[in-house]
Image: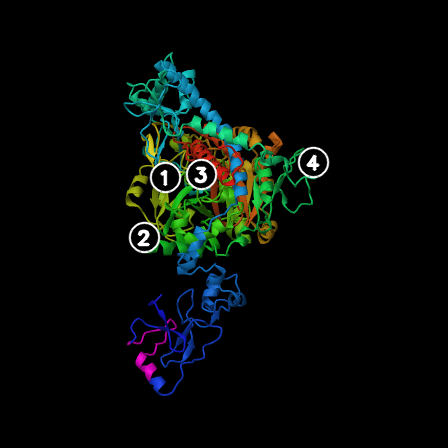
Amino acid sequence: MGKKLRVAKQQNGTASEVGEDPGVSSRTRSGGRRATSEAKVQSRADGETDELKFPKQCRARHRDENGNAVESTMCHQCQRNDKGRVVRCTRCRTKRYCIPCINTWYPQSTEEAIAEACPFCCGNCNCKACLRLDGPLKKMLDAGLTYGDDEKLRHNVYILRMLLPILQHENQEQTLEKKLESELRGLSLSELKVQKADVDEDERVYCNNCMTSIFDFHRSCPNCLYDLCLICCREIREGHLQGGEEEVVAEYTNYGFDYLHGGKPRCQRLEGKVEVNVNDVATSDDNVKLASKWKAKDDGIIPCPPEIMGGCGNGLLELRCIFLDNPLSDLVEKAEELVQGYDYLEIQEDPGHRCSCFTSDGTVDLTSDKLRKAASREDSDDNYLFCPTAKDIQSEDLKHFQSHWTKGEPIIVGDVLETASGLSWEPMVMWRAFRQITNMKHGQHLDVTAIDCLDWSLVDINIHQFFKGYTEGRSDTKSWPQILKLKDWPPKNAFEDRLPRHGAEFMTALPFKEYTHPRHGILNVAVKLPDNILKPDLGPKTYIAYGVHPELGRGDSVTKLHCDMSDAVNILTHTAEVVLTPDQLRCVNKLKQKHLAQDKRELYSDSNVGKRCEEGKLSSICETEEADVALKNGCPSTLPGNTDQLVCEVNGLKSDSNHNNMDLSVDREAKSESTLTLQEKSVCNSTEVGETDGTMKRGNPGRKRKRRKHSGGVKSSKLKIEMDDLEDLTDEEVLGSPDNMSESNEINLDSALEGMEQAEGGALWDIFRRQDVPKLQEYLMKHFKEFRHIHCNLLSQVVHPIHDQTMYLTSEHKRKLKEEYGIEPWTFVQKLGDAVFIPAGCPHQVRNLKSCIKVALDFVSPENVKECLRLTEEFRVLPANHRAKEDKLEVKKMVVYGLQRVVKDLKALSRKRGSGGRS
């Protein structure tokens, strides 16, 4: 940026820029030298005037070494003046952009547009200073929503009506436990004083049995601090305790690169084969026996469980509370009084009965421009989704939004990016912004972890190389598109900390901010949590992945079917089209034939792959791990030690090779270990990151409480996947001739190319209705063995068909689902600038049709809190190490603090208005 300059007033009132030292000439930003004070005095002595003619269109006025007025050619973007012609902004008259920077960083803008209003004036400048939010752009992050008193009253009473029944139910649960405790102590209910638990405000308390968060009443052992939630207390007294299920570990075998494309599975060296540990299984059975012996006494007293179950086996579990100063019963009483006081308000009317999408006779208004057809269900009025345009949204549209949202329907808001400043979401702009932020903090974060969608292995790759493949595409040695997706980027820190300017742009673009804004959304229950309370990580998070238009069937850029505990909004901020050439499409079609042949061999034969490997009936020599990784990435195997290397790590095993697209290096210890065993294991909680999921990581076993991070887990029992044995059949022997190839499995070259050229959207979404979940689960349990996951292994077992996140329904599976069970999802294409609202509890999956950058944010709407609680109950009975096990949201705590805030705000409004609800 150079020296700071101060503006001095000359005698005639003309402003000029001078250096810090008046006696020494200094350089101007345009590269010339300023005249010293002695030269200026001499010029005046010669009779020259101070009135210099500066260009009218330029307010940044400079003089050359002779004191003559000059126009600065310093580009605001690159801070250089040697790159040729610049375009000057006629609005601010201070900023200039050189032609190379315009072409590189603002390819969508014209010289005329920049001359009329430069990127800085428009608020979308992506230079270093602006990406760091220097200067006036900082106010964008602090810009909040303002609500009038009438709005506050209406929204708060709306939340009160939604949350009060939930709090009343929780209060009844606590009252029953208090009555039991008072009977055990021989006290009356009014005399009972529950002791406060020793819990800090920044600490999360979890049940040691089911891992569900504890928000208030629970039982705890005074000796070992073993905690048990009220649900588990009730279940153990009734004799059917759940939630303490053992860990399930599934092993996925790496059968080599050729196997990924329909080839024969590579055999394994016998000395490296990992078998099920019989001792572990026996220990697991012992745990089950001990758990069955852990019972409550006849009077309801619960002893502390034995040490093998996490307790001490000596003490008795005593009743404890967290909200001592403000009991739940008092809060319920105050809320009930307020509800009665606001009975006269019209907002008690169910918004689901007021929707302009229907005509007076109750049929869908097909003439509406705010509807998008997404399904073809018979005898159903929810085939069309509410799809307004962001700029057309008026204040009354909030009620229209609520009328669909209360029914559990997704909502699509189009062109949301047009409501923001227009900051570029180009990958290299984001990379540049992220790099500048980390460089300021003296850290380098240029390596990222990506997921290879072909076999779901983890790959460490330089972020510049990743973004290059994002726009240009990548392929392996068989010309199969290599689809990568970033996992958790930016890592660790918050999105707004690592990409502050893009974070501000995203917040500006959010539609229906009353629900979605993470700090000022009045209808976002998560916002109600106090500042001193540990909050869940609700985003925003970026999801960056490659994508191609044709459905490959294997290795597609997908987020597999899953269900989020909270509501979410997902905005498509950038797309890049990667076109497969006709030659590549032909290669893909040939490989798809091999994939189909492999599926038929393994699904419909009675023998087992693993056994044949042991018997040596397949090839006796196994190729090395590094050769497989090289083939996958389209690069020949090379010797280690290359100076231009990038690390590629696949599920803990690192391999080496070199190529112009991706360089791979060897981890010596991992390579040595891989010569002993070529089998890679993957625990069931190690899955790909979801489009709308916040965090996925599990912690260390044994912790019962957590500060900032939670961890949990128990001993595991291993389940080994046994695949069907194969006969030595050729593809043609299985499929017949290539003419018998399924038409749905083959990509038509002409239609594929035409579709890619004409496709507007970037991602294909499938979202299922909540009422269809039982039939969806039934279909998945019936067909789960037809799905492949890590290393393209067929699934051999399922814990939960949706929460496992191991299956993606292709177009063929969706056809069979409707044929067999009569259900179908809402299916639509997300276009650039579309914001997709996903209600909590709706299973969904996504496939990228192009390379995409999406930014997602979770929120908690009052309408869907009950659904969040239902999902919490589902998650609590999953195995201890399951990816969805941890109660990250803590919905019950949100409800308590949310109602506390609502009661406080309504009382303040009542005092301010002088009438209204009772105080």
- Whichever of callouts 3 and 2 sits on the residue coming sooner in the sequence is 2
Q: In the image shown, does 464 or 748 lie closer to the viewer?
A: 464
Q: Which mark is residue 362?
A: 4
In this orientation, does residue 432 appear?
no
CA–CA distance in space, label 1 to label 4: 49 Å
Do the residues bearing badges 4 and 3 touch, measured as CB atoms within 8 Å?
Answer: no
The stretch in magenta equals: 23-41
Could you give the CA–CA distance between mark 4 and mark 3, rounded to whole angstroms? 38 Å
Q: Which mark is residue 443?
A: 2
Sort mark 2 into few (<14), some (14-19) or many (20+) by Cα contacts within 10 Å: few
* Element carrying mark 2: loop
Q: Nearer the viewer, residue 558 or 603?
A: 558
**Circle 3 crowding by C-alpha within 10 Å: few under 14, some 14–19, many from 20:** many
**Residue designated by label 1:** 532
Q: Three-letter amino acid code at disc 4?
A: Gly
Whole-angstrom CA distance, mark 1 to mark 3, is: 12 Å
Query: Does residue 40 appear in this view?
Result: yes
**Disc 2 or disc 1, which is closer to the eye?**
1
